[in-house]
Image: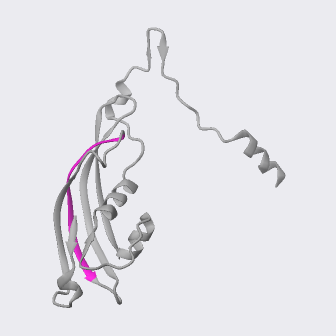
Amino acid sequence: MNIDLTRLRSGIDKFVSIDLTYSFKDEYLNDEIRTLDDVKITGEITRGNLDDYILNVNIKGTAILICPVTLKDVPYDFDINLNDSIANLCDEIGINIENITNTIDILPIIWQNIIMEIPTYVVSPDASKTELEGDGWTLNKVKQEGNSELSKLKDLF
């Protein structure tokens, strides 16, 4: 998703408009995200101080996630607003950009912000109807307990 910054960089334009619809393919999807199609990305890139650029975009879409109890698809709507310098956004996600020349690929920035928004665990509305016991089996719920060794430290204070 390369954005041409030539006219912005030379001062001909004050901003570069972004109006894209993108579908993330298999290399981005994992066991929790089944599909991520028709993500709408709208906004603009403007010139900041010196060679810095400001990314101001809205990212809207629906991710199809998997319920771990029922294994059914669960739609999860997201609406993300980004308004920061591209250098800061790249630093946050660990991308090293030395010098932005005539184009920039904003897809890694978009992807990382979507990933941060999507929950790691969703439950289908049908999960309450799911049987948690059967002939010779039961679904055990894991209790979240603290580390017993570390809990001894609180007695020291």
* Residue in the picture at 33% in, 35% down: 124
**What is the quadrant of residue 135 in the picture?**
top left
Residue 91 on the magenta segment: no
Q: Give the percent coordinates (x, y) of residue 20.
A: 16, 63
State the residue in front, 133 or 147: 147
How many marks on residues? 0
* Residue in the picture at 24% in, 54% down: 61
* Residue in the picture at 41% in, 66% down: 95
State the residue in front, 93 or 125: 93
Question: Compared to 149, does 55 lie above or below?
Answer: below
Question: Compared to 2, does 29 lie above or below?
Answer: above
The stretch in magenta equals 32-46
* Left or right position of 152 against 35: right
Question: Compared to 9, does 40 lie above or below?
Answer: above
* Left or right position of 34 against 38: right
Majority secondary structure of magenta residues? strand
* Left or right position of 73 against 148: left
Residue 42 on the magenta segment: yes
Q: Give the percent coordinates (x, y) of residue 82.
A: 33, 69
- What colouring does the structure picture have? one colour
Work out which quarter of the rendered image holds the N terminus and state it: bottom left
